[in-house]
Amino acid sequence: MTTKTAAAAAQATVYGYPRQGENRELKKAIEGYWKGRVTAEALRTTACELRRSNRQELTAAGIHEVPTGDFSYYDHVLDTTVMVGAIPERHRAAVAADAPDGYFAMARGTQDVAPLEMTKWFDTNYHYLVPELGPDTVFTADSAKQVAELKEALAEGLTARPVLVGPVTYLLLSKPAPGVAADFDPLTLLDRLLPVYAEVLADLRAAGAEWVQLDEPALVQDRTPAELNAAERAYRDLGTATDRPKLLVASYFGRLGDALPVLAKAPVEGLALDFTDAAAANLDALAAVGGLSGKRLVAGVVNGRNIWVNDLEKSLATLGTLLGLADRVDVAGSCSLLHVPLDAALEKDVDPQILTWLAFARQKTAEIVALAKGLAQGTDAITAELTVNRAALSSRATSPITRDPAVRARAEAVTDADSRRSQPYADRAAAQRTHLGLPLLPTTTIGSFPQTTELRTARADLRAGRIDTAGYEERIKTEIRDVISFQEKTGIDVLVHGEPERNDMVQYFAEQLTGYLATQHGWVQSYGTRYVRPPVLAGDISRPEPMTVRWTSYAQSLSDRPVKGMLTGPVTMLAWSFVRDDQPLGDTARQVALALRDEVGDLEANGTSVIQVDEPALRETLPLRAADHSAYLDWATEAFRLSTAGVRPETQIHTHMCYAEFGDIVQAIDDLDADVISLEAARSHMQVAYELADHGYPREAGPGVYDIHSPRIPSQEEAATLLRTGLKAIPAERLWVNPDCGLKTRAWPETRTSLENLVAAARTVRAELDSD
């Protein structure tokens, strides 16, 4: 095929699209279903309409091949678990009795049955449900969802491509089921799983699929020879299967590395590669294997994870280079557009200049279409788009909004001493024990308490002018008094004010820092029906005035027990925002750290003796390749210490992390030099406690005994059992008792009972220790 012919064949596609709808219709329908206000049929109707709307929107924008199967009621990995029949034994009866209820039971649990473990999807803030597998797992094909959604698109006369999680990634993301030996390797089930995938592919071919996309993002991570051999075997077997559609194997989130030669040689018809941050590495690797002769290449040249406008000319140059390396080059985002908000045009309160710099899912779709048109027809065909794009890029590059000389001078003046506590941990611990006077196995919570309907209504009333600031603040005070009173009556040792004034743990701070801007409609799925609005980090960061001191001090005035000051750490402030891409992340993290350092100092000066700086994103942001870990962890841990190191020895610094593979970063957790860390542990059966023990972690830790992402209420004995398990790894004098995470998403009735059981469990185990 000549270059001219290849260019003419260029088409536009995406791997996935935001699921929730412009007004989060899916969230509302699902939560209504859980509460019994929405029927199963009404929920299906809402979902069907959202899928139809997305397809129509993509087609109208100029997308030639729409994805199907990317829609999910909760999580696409959970959908894959259903597709391959890997239902955990404890959920099979529920799934058999009622498929939707059983599906949500796997995701959320019930009072009697624990849910699947949840963790981060690679280095994003999206959470997936971890498959549980064992040597006795039997896979069976269930392609009903995938076939039905394909048929919806085909019935509309569209060219559609089903998207599935690939078999290798599915197994690499899985864990041994409860009761299975910890060293069981799910990848040993590959030969058992491949025939099921072959059956699903045959069903999709029979339903009319020409192409099927198999997502293998796990192959952009470091992989052993055995894992690469598994990938080679998987795509040899699937590629040579009879009665199958054409296969497009997709990778994203980074460079494919050693897996690229494996997939380039596989008997599949196409590969999809990330050419954004990994452009140079994947270009070089593709050239090194001699290109993709006879194959389709889908080039991800529009970043699917950030919200900045694409440099169209730069992307066109990359696409032009690729034309000589494949028989057909199509244009796409670097990954699913699930990870960005729907439409920047909905943001009416954003500075018009900044708005021209932003591209959400609809704008990214337009960029993809423009690039495909430019590649196929030449740049003259997109002259208008290029002109607008150049103006936006120039505006951002020269805008004074992005640079503050005073902030930059302060960051450049930081020394190593600024990120070191004045005394070693052992001395600090002794001072803190004397100052705080806490019992053995002290109890606390992570920070937030339930955000009630009354609170949300008060916040909406304030924005709408139905109440004034004074009325709103009285509501906040009432909530804080109630939260403090409940904690004192329950017997919790270190209290929190409950964060009733906070809309989100990142957005709340972003709205008070220079350099950030908030959106009104920039919702992104975090997990299930939990959507967040990541703020946009557009310029240099500083803190004009205290952000949390007033409400923390008010809460402390209501109790003689210590009340924690609650802050979000610098890495999480970056990870859960859309960060600027015009300077190194480490430089931005240092700016955030200095702003937080000022807040920590003010909290301490106003009598706060316990200050928690949450860093749940520390593991999430870890680069996918080991070679990149050290540089990241150096600036990430330095930023945390810079935030917290200025306090007196008797001031106790806490941090918190949740829903990630902590074992990968235990040394970094140690390097934070926090006095206490609380971590998610309930769903993972205290695994992190043993990981800390194996490392020799010398400080205090609170592995969670209450899974807050499930509506079920843990009994006193269940919490006590987890606590006893934790004591096998962490000495009692260094063990805290707490939930897995904040309680914002829970309702008050379940929160009350769960925390009462948690405190009772701590008292029970204390008594057992005293009697030994």
Image: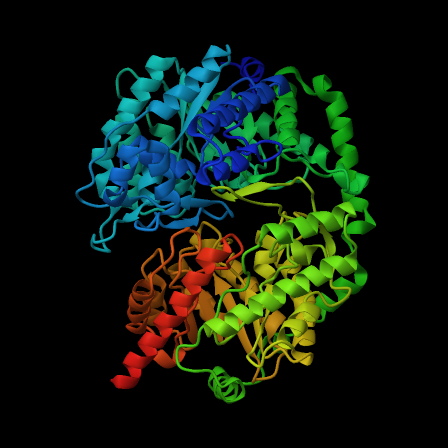
Who's the residue at 29% across and 68% down the image?
725
Position of 574 compared to 169: left or right?
Answer: right
Who's the residue at 42% across and 60% down the image?
680
Q: Disc count in the image?
A: 0
Q: Is residue 166 visible?
A: no
Measuring from the top left, give residue 301's x and y in whole percent.
58, 32
Q: Farthest residue toward the left?
A: 136
Question: Can you tell which quarter of the image residue 480 is in?
Answer: bottom right
Measuring from the top left, give residue 477's x and y in whole percent.
67, 65
Q: Nearer the viewer, residue 551 or 311?
A: 551
Position of 403 compared to 184: left or right?
Answer: right
Measuring from the top left, give residue 544's x and y in whole percent.
78, 64
The colour scheme applied to this rendered structure is: rainbow
Q: Nearer the viewer, residue 415 or 758?
A: 758
- Decide: is 177 above or below 288: below
Quarter of the C terminus within the rendering: bottom left
Who's the residue at 53% across and 62% down the image?
615
Position of 378 compared to 544: left or right?
Answer: left
Q: Is residue 81 visible?
A: yes
- Decide: is 459 above or below 194: below
Question: Can you tell which quarter of the image residue 771 is in?
Answer: bottom left
Measuring from the top left, give residue 593's x and y in whole percent.
64, 65
